[in-house]
Amino acid sequence: MEFVANQIIFLLLSAVIVVCSVLAVTSRRILRAATYLLFVLFATAGYYFQLDYHFLGAVQITIYAGGILVLFVFAIILTSKLGERSGHISSTKRAWGLLAAVAGAVICGYTLLTHSFFPSQFAEGGEVDMKVIGHMLMGTEKYQYLLPFEAISILLLACIIGGIMIARKR
């Protein structure tokens, strides 16, 4: 019975992600697109919780749904008029977008099928210990992510400073 419930939850989350993703990229109102993106991020966190990756689910909600999307909404509000619609997209731009999406899907599929992404400490199954996650994020050796972590923090700081500067000009 638990297996059937997990499949139903997975299918519901998948349906939410697919529908809201399509609505996010086809919506002409930019705040609605940001709202659809919020639903996609919450459903992705639902995947993580279903897989018992509670840390990743919490990070998905706090960092992406909470932080990044709030930055998007602030940038939208500061740079455009409320209720403004996006312009029409020409057929050549639409074709290039479709080509880029197909190329991205092919590259992602190839990468997933040809590479092993799990170092030996993750092969045990279950949830990863918080010490391992901390050492992976703050280490400087192979498969450790201190440099990207710092680069992202500088990028977010630059976004915040840019938002403040735009807000001060108004």
Image: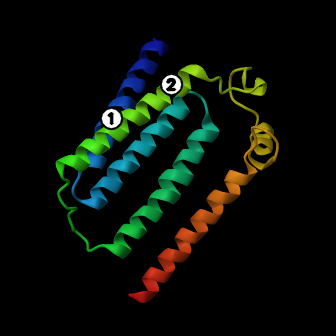
Tell me which corner region of the image, top left, top right, bottom left or bottom right, holds residue 87. Answer: bottom left
Q: Which mark is residue 111?
A: none
Q: For residue 103, say whether it is visible.
A: yes
Residue 139 location (% of width, % of height): 81, 46
Tell me which corner region of the image, top left, top right, bottom left or bottom right, holds residue 16. Answer: top left
User: Is 146 or 105 nearer to us in this picture?
Assistant: 105
Residue 122 location (% of width, % of height): 73, 26
Residue 155 location (% of width, % of height): 59, 63
Secondary structure under the numbered disc 1 in the rendered image = helix
The type of residue carrying mark 1 is Val
Q: Mark 1 highlights which residue? A: 18
User: Is 5 or 57 nearer to us in this picture?
Assistant: 57
Residue 146 location (% of width, % of height): 75, 51
The type of residue carrying mark 2 is Tyr
Q: For residue 20, say whether it is visible.
A: no
Q: Is residue 10 left or right of residue 61?
A: left
Q: Mark 2 highlights which residue? A: 110
